[in-house]
Amino acid sequence: ADPAKVPMEPLELPPTVAGPSDFAASGAGTQRTYTEFRQLIEYPAIGRQERAAFLDARARFDAREAAHRAEHAAYGEGLRAHRPTKQAQEAKEVMPAEGGA
């Protein structure tokens, strides 16, 4: 024997849970299969000393990052220094070989 099924009455939800009234009234709210939560995080105020310490640390970080980028860009430069540039190769082809032409 199957258990008796009682028809459910419509639930009255608070607006923060039900969402905007025009959205719920349109019937579009019944198609969602998920619940979305939002929250606001309010952080404590930051004092001048804390801000100055942060800005100092940020400046040191930026300087280190710039130095690291320069190091990274220099990888292999020693190998590239011995390779003639495209302009030098073109100039060599145009000039006659030693001993005249």
Image: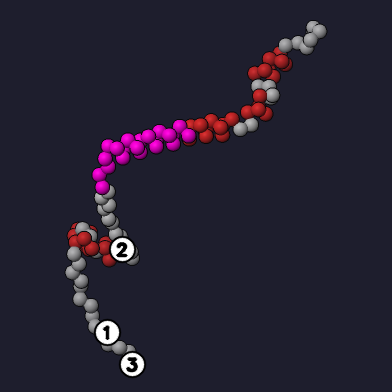
Q: Quadrant of residue 59?
A: top left
Quadrant where the image shows the C terminus? top right
Q: Which residues are magenta?
A: 44-64
Q: CA distance from mark 2 to mark 1?
A: 26 Å
Q: Nearer the viewer, residue 101 or 69?
A: 69
The dominant secondary structure in magenta is helix
- Mark 3: few, some, or many residues within 10 Å (few <14, many ≥20)? few
Q: Residue at x 39, y 37 (%)?
A: 57
> Residue 10: horizontal and vertical position, in percent?
20, 72
Q: Residue at x 28, y 56 (%)?
A: 38
Q: Earlier in the sequence, mark 3 or mark 2?
A: 3
Q: CA distance from mark 1 to mark 3?
A: 12 Å
Q: Residue at x 19, y 61 (%)?
A: 15
- Mark 1: few, some, or many residues within 10 Å (few <14, many ≥20)? few
Quadrant where the image shows the N terminus? bottom left
Q: Quadrant of residue 58?
A: top left
Q: Nearer the viewer, residue 24 or 12?
A: 12
Q: Type of residue at label 3?
A: Ala
Residue identifier under label 1: 5
Vertical relation: 6 (above or below) 18: below
Residue farthest to the top, as pictured: 100
Q: Quadrant of residue 17?
A: bottom left
Residue identifier under label 3: 1
Q: Residue at x 32, y 89 (%)?
A: 2
Q: Type of residue at label 2?
A: Thr
Q: Type of residue at label 1?
A: Lys
